[in-house]
Image (cartoon, rainbow, N blue to C red):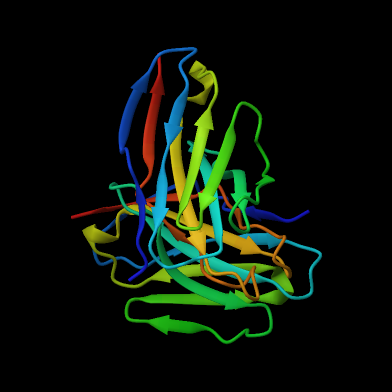
Amino acid sequence: AQKVTQAQTEISVVEKEDVTLDCVYETRDTTYYLFWYKQPPSGELVFLIRRNSFDEQNEISGRYSWNFQKSTSSFNFTITASQVVDSAVYFCALSGNNAGNMLTFGGGTRLMVKP
Amino acid sequence: DVKVTQSSRYLVKRTGEKVFLECVQDMDHENMFWYRQDPGLGLRLIYFSYDVKMKEKGDIPEGYSVSREKKERFSLILESASTNQTSMYLCASRTGGSGSGNTIYFGEGSWLTVV
């Protein structure tokens, strides 16, 4: 069975602060995929990033960066210089190696960025 | 852009009513999903479908059924709504092929209240 844990249920920061959202996963698969989604108040889940288990390079996209560490089974997400528009619920998710494996989500982290 | 459209954003139904939640995707995706989202529990998979007329139970199928008569449409049915089915329902789709590594795209969600 696979599992995703987002220990931080809620984080509050002031605009321009950096913030890191933690994600720890468990899987027995040797090949797997990790995702981050953003859910703004409107409700729709917006895809942010996908990583496969063989690619441990960190990735940066504008103010967003992701740190994938297989040794600690973590896939953390950092927002640099946070903005009010970053306020949302963020979900980390894991998908196993075959088509039969569905996406398993963490419980989500609610990020509130105050002006 | 991928578009997953859920027909109803907000519904209020009475206990015992039969409820239909409709979902349409415009990207010719083989796989479609219904998730339920509850505070602190993240997203939980109710049912998924690999292709037309194919369906598989997810983690919490009790009290639900689904229908996939056409590739673009996946319906979630609550045969007899109960108050514990008050929740946010999210439809999603993805292309088949290699399956689990492909990105899942979500609709905006349907907020169902059962009174």
Count of numbered labels shown in the rendering: 0
Classify A63 as above or below B75: below
Residue farthest to the front? B69
Tell me the quadrant of the picture where the C terminus of chain A can be found: bottom left
Q: Report if residue B15 is visible in the image.
A: yes
Classify A112 as above or below B30: above
Quick one: B103 or A34, which is closer to the camera? B103
Quick one: A76 or B52, which is closer to the camera? B52
At x 65% / y 36%, what residue is drawn?
B60
- Side (left or right) of B17 relative to B62: left
At x 65% / y 35%, what residue is drawn?
B61
Residue A83 position within the rendered picture, expressed as x and y whole percent measured from the top left: 24, 63
Classify A74 as above or below B65: below
- Side (left or right) of A21 relative to A93: left
Quick one: B101 or B68, which is closer to the camera? B68
Query: Which image quarter: residue A101?
Result: bottom right
Residue B8 position within the rendered picture, expressed as x and y whole percent measured from the top left: 32, 38
Residue farthest to the left? A115
Residue B44 position within the rendered picture, expressed as x and y whole percent measured from the top left: 59, 43
